[in-house]
Amino acid sequence: MLRSKLLIAALAALALIIAGCQPSAPDTAGSDDGDSAQTPEDSTATSDDASEPADSGDGEVTKLGFITKFPVDFFIVMEDAVKAWDAEHDDVEVIFGTGADAADSAGQIELIESMVAQGVKGIAVTPAGEEVIPALQAAVDEGVKIVLVDNDLPTWDGKSALVATDNFQGGKLAGEWLATQLEPGSTLAILEGVPGVPSLDDRVNGMLEGLGELDVEVVGRAPTNCAQDLGVSGAEDLLTANPEVDAIYAACGPPTVGALQAIKNAGIAPDDIILVGFDAQAEEVAAIIAGEQDATVAQFPPKMGELGIETLYQVLNGESVEAFVDTGTALVSKDNADQF
């Protein structure tokens, strides 16, 4: 009997040992998709905002805003340069926005207010017009630094810097080139950008100054809002009223392309009219190489975008910056178009 009891006790102890060696079932109660829980080593940080970058470990990520006027090549390549800059800076996150068209101040105001609500510390913006000043001032009052890019707001002193083309000088380059092509008594039509926007007005006024003492008659002007379709219609109206006009000057790239289409539609040979634009869009450069357009003024939007966001970054870091950062211009003609 004693031997039987000892045998039963030994078997029970052996069963307990075997049971303790078996793996326990995973706890999946906290997993919505049935996957096993991650260990600390292979877990991934998440946040409510999927676009929020993880901290690099060197400090908090600083949010910056970058707002352009509207989605055309000029501003797209500018934005691409800022994205490349952003990719090289782990301590910042750039939030992007753009208006619907060159005069979309209301859209830009919404973007400014949204970015402030998202906690940006600074905004680099190409303002559509003075209508955005109250929103920019409200941002400054909240401690947000503002750098203007491409366009100035001369009546507003809340900006930390202006990073832009010297548009008057660019227009002057166009006028000086036109003065070598026109004769006294020649006629000129002008496709304006957005009248009242200082940078765009400067392009026209600079061109007129560049003509110097040459006696040229301005036979008409048409606003375009820097839009290609308004460039077409504006040029058609000017050509209808002045079929023998000697030259057309357009203050923006898209309406220059529109004017080129209007000239073709009117059956005017390229050799019978001079067309000079501003921006050196890809379509303009191709047209110059093809002999359909005569010249344009090149800006450097990638440089403008990169210097714009870098200047804002420097301001936030307490560095001293120039009040005006000139990003340069160049005259593009058939002689050098292949370089652009």
Image (cartoon, rainbow, N blue to C red):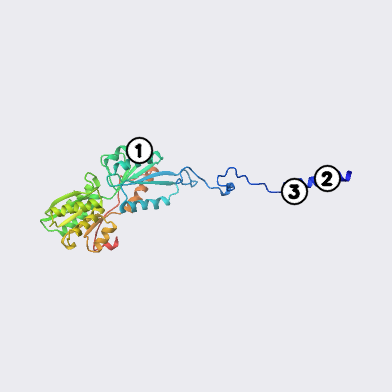
Asked if the residues shown at circle 2 and circle 1 are in contact, with their CB atoms under 8 angstroms apart, the answer is no
Q: Residue at x 40, y 46 (%)?
A: 94
Tag 2's secondary structure?
A: helix
Q: Compared to 114, does 85 lie above or below?
A: below
Residue under label 2: 8
Picture coordinates of residue 133 (x, y %)? 29, 39
Image disc number at residue 139: 1
Determine the secondary structure under disc 3.
helix
Within-10-Å neighbours for mark 1: few <14, some 14–19, many 20+:
many
| Amino acid on which the number 3 mark rests in the picture | Ile
Tell which tag, 2 or 3, sits nearer the viewer. Answer: 2
Give the left or right position of residue 140, taking residue 288 as reference: right
Which quadrant does the N terminus fall into?
A: top right
Taking the view exactly as shown, the residue that stands out farthest to the right is 1
- Going from the N terminus, do you reach mark 1 or mark 3 first? 3
Q: Is mark 1 on a helix, strand or loop?
A: helix
Relative to residue 151, is residue 182 drawn left or right? Answer: left
Q: Nearer the viewer, mark 2 or mark 1?
A: 2
Cα–Cα span, label 2 and label 3: 16 Å
Q: How far apart are marks 1 and 3 (CA)?
A: 70 Å
Label drawn at residue 242: none
